[in-house]
Image: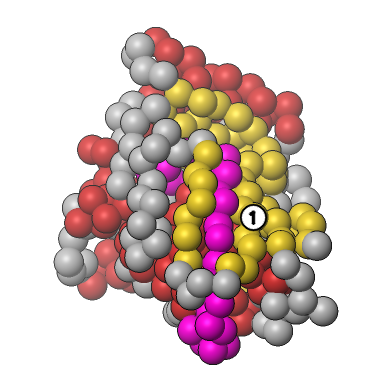
Amino acid sequence: MSFSRAEAFAPATVANLGVGFDILGLALQGLGDRAIVEFRDEPEIVIADIQGDGGQLPREPEQNVASVSARAFLDHIGEKRGLKIELIKGLPLSSGLGSSAASAVVAVLALNKLVGEPFTREELLPFCLEGEALVSGYHADNVAPCLLGGIVLVAGITLDAIQPLPVPANMHIALVTPDFPVPTNEARAILPGQVPLASMIHQTGRVAQLVDALHRGDLEALGAAMEGDAVIEPARACLTPSLDEVRSAAKQAGAIAVFIGGAGPTLCAVCNSAEIARRAAAAMECVYSEAKMDCVAQYTQVDRRGAMVLRAE
Ligand code: HSE
């Protein structure tokens, strides 16, 4: 059954989980973007409105992540009609919360509904990746958990490389997002082009420990593995002011581990109860307040549902 108008929601995500650069990500409950899509008779895609971006996102369809993803979908199915897209951004831009992935996913999921859901969620990944690539290249560690929910291993960008991982029942996450952007492409440009063999051995060992810890539901081991990043965090620490102070404050409040969300600057604290996550969020906020930096602190859990269609008519 096809529709003339569809609205969807896509959750925030955090990528990397410390050691899993470009291969691990998780979805977050509560935070996210919405999009409303409608067919138009003319062949072009039009970004009719964007709310919540402070006027910063491009309205030109060939430069906007949502419309580029939607264009990949329309071309693939041979659809000649164009599209009107309204985007309601709940996620801050360049914050490490997967804003561009959410824009891509929310438009493609609504569009899939509009044409009668010919594709599974997993099959929507390549279209979403086209939009995400516009901002920061082909990596699926935000797009995959955004689409599917949960914690996801993306060992590559093809469908057979996506593996959902277990989510520990008592895993809570505190987040602090300082009020300045870190564009993903800049945070990627700062990374080393090559790593020594010893670093590679260390890093792959920690990723293996992380996956094992998820399977055993062992948050302490998970946290130790997350914080074992010897490659990415050291290179990006200069983009994330007060990282050490925030980590220390969160741990004093009871958090198990702190890692940089995606390219940052959001910092994520893994906790084993909602009360500790609440305290960790407050402690992390306090560090930025004392440094006279605006920030948003919150606490949540892993979203297990992924993006969803809200309505279609
Ligand atoms: N894996 C990507 C990076 C995620 O860290 O650059 C960007 O959100």
Q: Is residue 267 left or right of residue 170?
A: left
Q: Decide: is 90 above or below 279.
A: below
Give the camera-side residue of 125 and 177.
125
Name the residue: 69% across, 57% down. Answer: 8
Label 1: state its secondary structure. strand
Q: Residue at x 63, y 42 (%)?
A: 31
- Determine if residue 132 is in view: no
From the viewer's perspective, tell me whether residue 225 is left or right of residue 27. Answer: left
Q: Position of residue 270 (x, y in %)?
A: 59, 41
Of all residues, the one furthest to the front in this rendering is 41
Nearer the observer, 63 or 3:
3
- Which residue is denoted by mark 1 in the rendering? 36
Viewer-side residue, 276 vs 154: 154
Residue shown at 39% from the left, 52% from the top: 59
- Judge whether residue 182 can be spotted in this image: yes
User: Which residues are drawn in magenta?
Assistant: 73-97
Expressed as whole percent of the image width and height from the top left, the position of residue 126 reads 50, 79
Task: Assess whether residue 83 is covered by the magenta stretch.
Answer: yes
x 41%, y 28%: residue: 178
Coordinates of residue 92 in the picture (x, y in percent): 47, 38
| Quarter the N terminus occupies | bottom right
